Image (cartoon, rainbow, N blue to C red):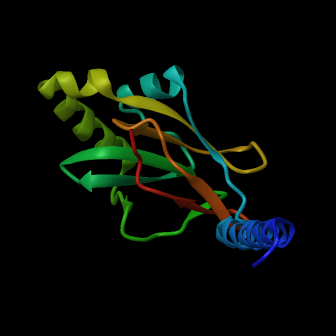
Amino acid sequence: MTSSKSRNINYVGFFALLFLFVSFFIGGCASNIPTGQWESDLGVKNNFETGTAVPNHTYYYWGSYNSPDAIIAIDNHYTLREGNVWAKAEGVPDDSLKKWFSLYKTKGERQAFYSGGVISAPDGRQAGIWYSLCANNIVQMPTPRELVIFQPTE
């Protein structure tokens, strides 16, 4: 028969081991990649809706080129790690923006639900701007001046 004192020691040891395991598991999953911000800004939304491109920025879109779900413009001092989320808008950005926004205006309701804002680097500097139905996103900078911008979410 085991004493209650030795049973308590076994429980303490078990919970201590469980705590260490969970701590290492959570710590191992945490990212050390610096993160920036995806913040709403009504002025940026209005700027996008005029259809005038911001100079010294490269434009990307998510979704269909003819009716994108989101548009970003990255300052040319930064690069976007290209993947399967964002496609580079070819041609003259002003032409693409005017085409997209004339389409949004004919659909009416789309424009009302869009938001716009600023993409900030981890150091707080503005790295770009965004326009999207979804106002949440993750911005990372795995190497200096290289951005990873995920698919926007609600």
Quarter of the rendering containing residue 21: bottom right
Q: Residue furthest left?
A: 106
Indicate left or right for 40 with 68 as reference.
right
Q: Residue at x 13, y 26 (%)?
A: 106
x and y percentages locating residue 105 in the rendered image: 19, 25
Quarter of the rendering containing residue 144: bottom right
Number of marks in the rendered image:
0
Relative to 143, residue 50 above or below: above
Q: Please state, as top left, top right, bottom left or bottom right, where the N terminus lies in the image.
A: bottom right
Q: Residue at x 38, y 47 (%)?
A: 93
x and y percentages locating residue 30 in the rendered image: 68, 65
Viewer-proximal residue among 50 and 131? 131
Viewer-proximal residue among 99 and 72? 72
Q: Residue furthest front?
A: 1
Q: Residue at x 51, y 28 (%)?
A: 44
Q: Please state, as top left, top right, bottom left or bottom right, where the C terminus lies in the image.
A: top left
x and y percentages locating residue 118 in the rendered image: 57, 37
Q: Residue at x 75, y 42 (%)?
A: 124
x and y percentages locating residue 84 in the rendered image: 36, 69
